[in-house]
Amino acid sequence: MECIVCKGLTEKKNVNYILDLNNTIIIIKDVPANVCTKCGERYFDDDVMENLEKIVNNLRTITTEMSVVSYKENVA
Ligand SMILES: [Zn+2]
């Protein structure tokens, strides 16, 4: 696909998705994304976004300061 920011080309890559919630930081490893080869902007497919939301919702009850999870292990 084409990058919305700079119109560069994107390539499929696994990235770490870092989310800063109120009192915890969630890191989801190896998330499939389209990454711009020029500016580094990241785009996630709709189904990936859905899965990320599910994973985050499952982790909301956790009270540790930081959670690191693997995307693959949390997606059926
Ligand atoms: Zn770009």
Image (cartoon, grey):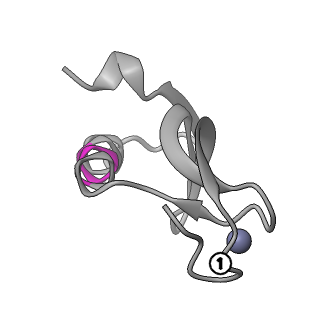
Most extreme residue toward the right is 38
Relative vertical location of residue 46 with respect to residue 54 in this rendering, above or below: below
Magenta stretch: residue 11 in it?
A: no
Ligand 1 within 8 Å of disc 1? The answer is: yes
**Mark 1 Cα shell of 10 Å, populated few (<14), some (14-19), many (≥20):** few
Residue 48 higher or lower than 76, as above or below = below
Pinpoint residue 36: horizontal percent, then vertical percent.
Answer: 68, 59
Q: Nearer the viewer, residue 26 or 36?
A: 36
Q: Which residue is mark 1?
A: 7
The extreme bottom residue here reads 5
Q: Quadrant of ligand 1?
A: bottom right
Instruction: Provide residue 41's location: percent of width, then percent of height.
Output: 67, 66
Residue 45: x %, y % from top left: 34, 54
| Badge 1 amino acid | Lys
Residue at left offset 56%, top offset 54%: 24
Q: Secondary structure at mark 1?
A: loop
Name the image quarter holding the C terminus: top left
Question: Where residue 73 appears, x then y in whole percent?
Answer: 36, 16
20 sits to left or right of 62: right
Residue at image position (26%, 50%) is 57
Q: Is residue 21 above or below residue 27?
A: below
Magenta stretch in the rendered image: 50-54
Q: Decide if residue 76 is on the left or right side of residue 28.
A: left
- Examine the rendering and report whether any part of residue 65 can be seen: no
Q: Where 68 sits versus 52, above or below?
A: above
Helix, strand or loop: magenta stretch: helix
Total label count? 1
Task: Tell me what residue is drawn at x 39 percent, y 20 percent.
Answer: 72
